[in-house]
Image (cartoon, rainbow, N blue to C red):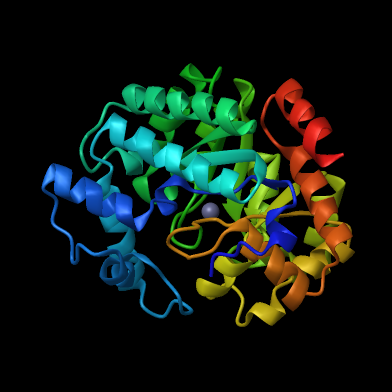
């Protein structure tokens, strides 16, 4: 459940792992469907929620595919994309997130209606500029290349991100680590790195520690999305510490996707205690019906982390954030110290 308990809400927060495509409000999906004559399984929020939100541990992959299909079909124009981004930034401000990185997969998000990527980015940049001003926050942008979209899509996405590197700070390789071999993606991701973009890779979410080991050696990433299964092999934990890699952890998401069996077993605190730089994030806040406040609640009430330890996770996120140094430092000095 989304949480607005003042205990967590009033803390200034960071978030460095959030997918825009998983953060679209139900009401917005309905508004857009009406405006663009799109077919939906329901047109009232409570009913549509049954098709676009996941509350139980995922046993039915079909349900998730249906939700993301609806999201993809809702991204009908650059203006709509701008609205979705703006609303996400508003939702961040409501829970006092001051440093925020948003990520999206252009080839996946803009594929459904064959949108112009540059025009969509311009919309996102307008939303970013307004939100930074209105909410006094710093926002970074990460371009995702989805493994499921294939190697050619990866090349296209990386080239696009490089072309826009004054606005896009990093690339992320996401989705289906089990299904797609990494070899197809190494060359383009290293090209992004050579061009000055930062690199984060979804790894060790529903895959074993060995996947994280291979990811680190193949891509030399700055950060890893999830990485929770590294806990199963101390050699991998050591490697993460040696290379000073920050993990973007999403506890509730990991539970719902069955990447951990129970939420009590989540290794966030264990990794923290081992000296791994873990950060606390929401992943897909609308689909998973969570927010960063809720993730902090889980970290504290269920996993036993203290507020000081959570504050340390915030510092790790600040240090590892891809947002340019001057902007993030200003926000840090003003709100976090
Ligand atoms: Zn993710």
Going by the picture, which residue comes out furthest to the left?
37
Where 21 falls versus 236 (above or below)?
above
Q: Position of residue 5 (x, y in %)?
A: 66, 64
- Camera sees residue 33: yes
Where 140 falls versus 316 (above or below)?
above
Q: Nearer the viewer, residue 234 or 55?
A: 55
Going by the picture, which residue comes out furthest to the front?
6
Which residue lies at the image location 80% right of the left edge and 32% below the top edge? 334
Which residue lies at the image location 26% right of the left edge and 40% below the top edge? 111
- Camera sees residue 152: no
Position of residue 256 in the picture relative to residue 208 (left or right): left
Q: Position of residue 146 (x, y in %)?
A: 43, 46
Q: Where on the picture, by quarter, is residue 292?
A: bottom right
Q: Where on the picture, by quarter, is residue 290?
A: bottom right
Position of residue 37 in the picture relative to residue 58 (left or right): left
Q: Position of residue 321 (x, y in %)?
A: 70, 37
Q: Nearer the viewer, residue 295 or 65?
A: 295
Q: Nearer the viewer, residue 70 or 174?
A: 70
Where 295 falls versus 116 (above or below)?
below
Which residue lies at the image location 61% right of the left edge and 61% below the top edge? 4
Image quadrant containing the C terminus: top right
Which residue lies at the image location 69% right of the left edge and 24% below the top edge? 324
């Amino acid at each position: 459940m989304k949480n607005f308990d003042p205990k967590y809400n009033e803390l200034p927060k960071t978030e460095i792992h959030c997918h825009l495509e998983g953060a679209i409000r139900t009401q917005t999906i309905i508004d857009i469907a009406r405006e663009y004559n799109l077919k939906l399984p329901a047109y009232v929020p409570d009913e549509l929620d049954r098709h676009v939100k996941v509350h139980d541990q995922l046993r039915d992959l079909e349900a998730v595919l249906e939700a993301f299909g609806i999201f993809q079909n809702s991204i009908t124009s650059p203006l709509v994309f701008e609205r979705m981004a703006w609303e996400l930034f508003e939702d961040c401000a409501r829970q006092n997130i001051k440093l925020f990185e948003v990520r999206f997969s252009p080839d996946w998000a803009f594929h459904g209606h064959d949108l112009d990527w540059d025009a969509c980015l311009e919309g996102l940049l307008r939303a970013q500029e307004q939100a930074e001003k209105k909410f006094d926050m710093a926002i970074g942008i990460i371009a995702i290349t989805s493994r499921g979209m294939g190697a050619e899509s990866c090349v296209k996405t990386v080239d696009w991100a490089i072309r826009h590197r004054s606005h896009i700070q990093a690339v992320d390789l996401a989705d289906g680590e089990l299904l797609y071999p990494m070899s197809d993606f190494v060359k383009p991701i290293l090209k992004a790195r050579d061009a000055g973009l930062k690199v984060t890779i979804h790894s060790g979410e529903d895959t074993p520690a060995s996947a994280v080991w291979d990811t680190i050696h193949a891509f030399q990433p700055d950060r890893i999305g999830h990485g929770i299964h590294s806990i199963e092999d101390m050699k991998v934990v050591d490697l993460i510490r040696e290379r000073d890699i920050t993990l973007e952890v999403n506890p509730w998401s990991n539970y719902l996707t069955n990447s951990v069996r129970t939420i009590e077993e989540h290794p966030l605190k264990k990794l923290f205690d081992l000296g791994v730089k873990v950060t606390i994030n929401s992943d897909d806040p609308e689909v998973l019906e969570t927010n960063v406040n809720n993730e902090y609640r889980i970290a504290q009430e269920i996993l036993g982390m203290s507020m000081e330890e959570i504050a340390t996770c915030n510092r790790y996120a600040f240090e590892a954030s891809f947002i340019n140094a001057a902007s993030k430092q200003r926000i840090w000095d003003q709100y976090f110290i």
